[in-house]
Image: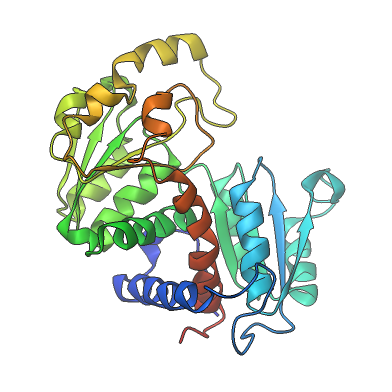
Amino acid sequence: MKHFINLKDISSRDLRKILIDAKKRKQSRKKLNNLDNDKGAPLKGKLLIQMFEKSSLRTRLSFYLAIKQLGGSTLTLRPDELHLSKGGESIEDTAKILSNFGNAFMLRTDNDVKLEDFKKYLSIPIINGLSPSSHPTQILSDVFTVEEIKKKPISKLNITWIGDSNNVLNSLIAASIKFSFKLKIGCPKNYQPSRNVKNYIKKNRNKVSIHYDPKKAAKDADVIFSDKVISMNDKVNKLKKLNQFKKFKINKKLMSFAKKDCIFLHCLPRGKEVEESVFLSKQSKVWQQALNRVHVQKSILLYCFGKLR
C-alpha cells in the first residue's frame, strides 16, 4: 500500500513507472468505449471512495472513469452529509470506517493537515485530489501530456509557468526536481513562491528561476503553463490582484517570445489570465491535457495498490 499525497515524497523512479504504465494503457484503449474495462480488469472488486470539500469537475470525472476502466467502482461522498463536517465524528473514527468499507480514499481538501491526519489513521491508500499546497495528480498528468505531444523527455524541454504562485505551481516545481527540467516562473514580485518553496528549490539545487518580466519567462519556452489568477476560495481583493497580473496575461504577443512550436497548457477552469486567441489556438492543448487525467490516474491507482505492470 502506497499513498499519493505530494510529488516530493515519491521517487523519480516510481513517478516514471507511473507515466510508462499510463502510456501503455492509453494506447491499448484506442478501440474501447469509456466504460469498457482494461484487459484483465486489475482492480476488479475494488472501491474508491472520493470526498470533495472543494468544487471539482475534471478530477471527479477522471477518477470515476479511472477506477471504472480498471474494473472497480467509486462512491462519492459530500462532506456536508457526514458527521465529520458537523463536528460529530473525529477524523480517526471516520478514517477507520472508510478503511473498512473502501479500498482507497481520494480527498480534495482545503486543509493540508487533514490529509496527513487521514493518512495517519487510514489502513488504505489516500490520494491527494488537490490541497492548498499541492495538486500532484494534475501535474503528473501534465508531464505525461507534454512528453506525449513533444515526443521527448521533459528533461530536454524548457518549461515556463506564467501566473500566480499556487498549489499547482508548487507541484510543478516538485516535478521539475523529480524529472530534472528547467522551469522559469513569471509572476509579479508580490506573488512569487513562498520562502519554504524557495528553500526546497535551493536545497535540491534545481534550475528554477523567477522572473518579474513575463517576456523573459516566456523566452524560448517549449511549453507555457498557466492557471486561474483568482483561485478557489481566494480571499483577496480580486480587482487589485487582477490589476497586478495585467501584464502577465497570456496573449499572442507574449507567446511570440516562446519557440514557434510552443504549446499552451492550463489546468482549468480558466479566467482572465489568457486571451481567447491563445486558449482556442492550435498551440493550446488544454482538452488533450484534461482527458489525459484519466490515463495517468489509472496508473496512480495501480501504484497505490502495488499493481503497476
The vertical placement of 76 against 41, above or below, is: above
Percent position of residue 302, x then y: 54, 78
Vertically, is 257 above or below 272? below
Q: Residue furthest bottom?
A: 40
What residue do we see at 47% from left, 83% from top? 308
Residue 122 in sight in this render = no
Residue 47 visible in the picture: yes
Looking at the rendered image, the quarter that the N terminus falls into is: bottom right
Q: Position of residue 102 (x, y in %)?
A: 75, 73
Left-right relation of 155 to 187: left
Is 142 positioned to the left or the right of 78 in the image?
left
Quick one: 144 or 81, which is closer to the camera?
144
Choose between 155 and 82: the one closer to the eye: 155
Please tell me which residue is depicted at 38% across the width and 50% down the height of the picture: 171
Residue at left offset 30%, top offset 30%: 192
The C terminus - image quarter: bottom left
- At x 32%, y 41%, the residue is 283
For the image, the number of numbered tags is 0
Q: Is residue 181 left or right of residue 21?
A: left
Q: List x then y, in percent, for residue 40.
A: 61, 90
